Amino acid sequence: MKTTITLLSILFFLGGLQAQHDDRVSTIEFVQILNNNIAETDYYYKNNWKLLREKALERGYIHSYELLETPFDETGPYHRILMTTYANEEQYEQREAHFEELIKEKGPLRLLNDKKPGEFRKRVMGKEGVRHWK
C-alpha cells in the first residue's frame, strides 16, 4: 500500500512538472552596440526588425515580440534583448518561411548613415526554442 501511494505521488508530481509548459516557443537574441552607435542600432531595429514583427503579428505568424534595453556590464555584455514569441510549435517551425515572405515584401534594409549592421551591432548570444512556463 505504501509503495502504491509513493508511486502515485511520484507520477502525480512528474505529471505536474510536464503541465508547467504552455504552447509558446520563443527566440531570444542578445545584442551589443558597437562604438557607441546607439542611433544607428535603434534605427535599424525599429525600422527593420520591429517593422517585420508588427507585420508578422498582424498576419498571425507570431504571438508577440519584445525589444528591450538593458544596461551593459561584465555579467551582461549586451545592450539590447530581442525576443520573438510564437503561439505554438507550428508557428515556430514556419518562422523562416514567414519572415522570408515579409522581408521580400518590405524591401531593402533601412539604415541610418549608410552604416551596415556589422559596423554598429554585434550578436553576443542567441537562444532558439525557448519554452514558456505557465
Image (tube, helix red, strand yellow):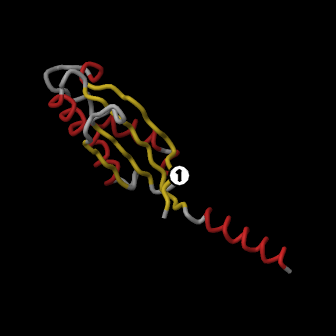
Give the mark count.
1
| Residue at the image point whose x is 44% and y is 52% from the top | 86
Q: Quadrant of residue 114?
A: top left
Across and down, in percent, residue 44 comes to 22, 32
Residue 100 vs residue 80: left or right? Answer: right
Q: Residues within 10 Å of mark 1 (few under 14, many from 20)?
A: few
SS state under label 1:
helix
Q: Quadrant of residue 2?
A: bottom right
Q: Amino acid at mark 1?
A: Glu
| Residue at the image point whose x is 51% and y is 52% from the top | 131
Across and down, in percent, residue 8 comes to 76, 74
Residue 36 vs residue 133: left or right? Answer: left
Across and down, in percent, residue 3 comes to 84, 74
| Residue at the image point whose x is 33% and y is 50% from the top | 65
Vertical comparison of 22 with 71: above or below? below
Vertical comparison of 119 with 30: above or below? above
Residue 96 vs residue 59: left or right? Answer: right
Residue 25 vs residue 83: left or right? Answer: right
Q: Which residue is mark 1?
A: 90
Q: Quadrant of residue 31?
A: top left
The N terminus: image quadrant: bottom right
Vertical comparison of 10 with 25: above or below? below
Across and down, in percent, residue 91 comes to 48, 51
- The front one of 116 and 122 is 122
| Residue at the image point whose x is 59% and y is 66% from the top | 19
Q: What is the residue that sits farthest to the bottom in this orientation?
A: 1
